[in-house]
């Protein structure tokens, strides 16, 4: 069994840590450096956890378990209006990052109001690129119940975070966490931190359900294996954007141009197969400077193989 | 500042009372307010935020916020209300130039070759500007989608009535009713 851990510390002797992860047969999922500080998300064999933990302590860092590693989550608010700052969605996004997820904060173009709020098809398609979405709404029960159209058509798992507990909308989303509405200060108190933990637990649960669903017809290859391959591709290794390759539960987001690099990526080989044969590549709906890769399932690949052999 | 909330939604009422208090404190207006009335009817939607200020907004001159005396060609100022210190310095610099204005301590400054009368009559804060800031603070504390707003201002009382789409006459009437209540009742506006 592999376990996903996060190292949080300085860059001091980090090269030794990377070598150690490689030596035990683990992989680095995400590496983020900010000045002299370093965060590394890694997947390592369970039996080597003690060795890695001990080394991390020796070099002055901390190590902790990160259940949401390898996921990208959108935290969506009706708008990112300046007069709401600080938003609870910033606290939620930060809390999920501490659990290992890559998070983005989104505001809808016309999400505000009770009678006039709306979400466009383009916005829905952008949200659908992520593994899960959290919708953070306000303090009035009647408004929340009137705004279910914002998230009822989203295909990925959604968690609704609101002030009061809404009624009659349980079937519109996968989970509801109440007690967090519009706020004018950071979520620092103990009950607020507990609320953030509750949100993290709910997200973890809906993602575990999604993982279980994926396990029924497993992916042909794990996204981390394609990530390793892509990191050797020069435009990716030279990419200056933060986290140039982001893991999803069923694929990856690669932050390089679709038009220029699609063909090169499709022609890469892994386990004797073209990536183009085992993945679907499409430009991100945000803009075409990112590629969304969806890995086909084993049964899909087998069916295609049979069709080719038959044809 | 006392806050009265009229709302059917218990959670929303408490949350908005806290939000209003926090936002007004953050932007430094809470201590200027005597009391506030928040009417929250999200089901309509109609929101009435009314406040009573401790003093009526008016223009402040240097003489209102500082002690002034003259010795020879030098006018000495001792600022008595710290809030206006940056505005006084800004006005002095822009009118007389930095070479004629010397700030000795946080509250003391000297101005050379300017008559006391001229210094004391300089307006450092206009009542209109102050009103704008207070109304802006009320808008900021209201729900974001409630964009259609009407403001009543009478002396110390400011009331903002807001809805999402178009105003019905009864909405404005209701807003005016709460405005009169804050004024003390009965006064025609």
Image (tube, coloured by chain):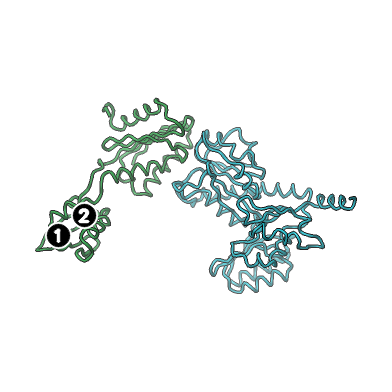
Disc sitting over residue B114 in the figure: 1
Disc sitting over residue B80 in the figure: 2
Q: Which chain is cyan?
A: A
Residue B171 visible, this angle: yes
| Residue A216 x/y as whole percent | 78, 48
Residue B86 is left or right of residue B69, and the answer is right
The secondary structure type at the circle numbered 2 is loop
- Dot 2 or dot 1: first in sequence order is 2
Disc sitting over residue A205 in the figure: none
Measuring 28% from the left and 29% from the top, which residue is drawn there? B189
Vertical comparison of B177 with A208: above or below: above
Q: Chain of mark 2?
A: B
Measuring 68% from the left and 56% from the top, which residue is drawn there? A252
| Residue B139 x/y as whole percent | 39, 41
| Residue B151 x/y as whole percent | 35, 35
Residue A246 visible, this angle: no
- Few, some or many C-alpha atoms within 10 Å of disc 1 (few <14, some 14-19, many ≥20)? some
Marks 2 and 1: same chain? yes
Q: Chain of mark 1?
A: B
The secondary structure type at the circle numbered 1 is loop
Quadrant in which residue A266 is drawn: bottom right
Q: Which chain is green?
A: B
Quadrant position of the N terminus of chain A in the picture: bottom right
Vertical comparison of A139 with A58: above or below: above
Residue A21 is left or right of residue B87, and the answer is right
Q: Are marks 2 and 1 in contact (CB under 8 Å)?
A: no
Q: Nearer the viewer, residue A191 or A124?
A: A124
């Amino acid at each position: 069994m592999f376990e996903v851990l996060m190292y949080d510390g300085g860059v001091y002797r980090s090269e030794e840590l990377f070598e150690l992860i490689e030596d035990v047969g683990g992989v680095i999922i995400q590496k983020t450096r900010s000045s002299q500080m370093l965060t590394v998300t890694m997947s390592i064999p369970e039996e080597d956890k003690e060795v890695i933990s001990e080394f991390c302590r020796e070099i002055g860092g901390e190590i902790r378990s990160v259940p949401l590693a390898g996921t990208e989550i959108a935290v969506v608010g009706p708008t990112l209006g300046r007069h709401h700052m600080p938003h609870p969605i910033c606290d939620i996004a930060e809390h999920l990052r501490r659990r290992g997820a890559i998070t983005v904060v989104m505001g809808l173009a016309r999400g505000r109001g009770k009678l006039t709020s709306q979400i466009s098809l383009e916005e829905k398609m952008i949200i659908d690129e992520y593994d899960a979405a959290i919708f953070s709404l306000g303090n009035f029960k009647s408004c929340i119940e009137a705004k279910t159209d914002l998230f009822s058509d989203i295909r990925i798992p959604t968690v609704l975070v609101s002030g009061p507990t809404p009624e009659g909308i349980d079937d519109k989303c996968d989970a509801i966490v109440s007690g967090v509405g519009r706020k004018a200060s950071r979520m620092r108190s103990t009950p607020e931190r507990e609320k953030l933990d509750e949100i993290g637990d709910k997200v973890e649960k809906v993602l575990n359900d999604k993982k279980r669903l994926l396990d029924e017809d497993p992916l042909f290859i794990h996204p981390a294996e394609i990530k390793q391959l892509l990191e050797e591709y020069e435009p990716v290794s030279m990419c200056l954007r933060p986290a140039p390759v982001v893991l999803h539960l069923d694929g990856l987001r690669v932050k390089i141009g679709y038009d220029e690099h699609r063909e090169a990526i499709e022609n890469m080989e892994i386990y004797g197969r073209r990536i183009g044969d085992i993945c679907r590549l499409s430009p991100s709906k945000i803009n075409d400077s990112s590629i969304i890769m969806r890995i086909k399932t084993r049964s899909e690949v087998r069916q295609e193989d049979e069709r080719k052999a038959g044809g | 500042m006392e806050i009265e909330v009229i709302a059917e939604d218990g959670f929303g009422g408490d949350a908005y009372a806290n939000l209003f208090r926090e936002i007004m404190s953050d932007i430094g207006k809470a201590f200027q307010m005597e009391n506030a009335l928040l009417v929250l009817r999200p089901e309509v939607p109609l929101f009435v935020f009314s406040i009573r200020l401790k003093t009526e907004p008016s223009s402040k001159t240097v003489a209102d916020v500082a002690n002034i005396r003259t010795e020879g060609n030098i006018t000495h100022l001792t600022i008595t209300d710290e809030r206006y210190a940056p505005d006084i310095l800004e006005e002095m610099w822009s009118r007389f130039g930095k070479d004629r204005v010397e700030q000795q301590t946080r509250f003391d400054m000297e101005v050379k070759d300017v008559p006391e009368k001229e210094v004391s009559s300089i307006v450092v804060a206009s009542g209109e500007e102050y009103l704008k800031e207070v109304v802006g603070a009320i808008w900021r504390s209201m729900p974001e989608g409630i964009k259609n707003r009407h403001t009543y201002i009478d002396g110390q009382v400011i009331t903002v009535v807001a809805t999402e789409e178009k105003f019905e006459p009864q909405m404005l009437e209701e807003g005016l009713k709460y405005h009169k209540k804050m004024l003390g009742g009965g006064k025609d506006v």
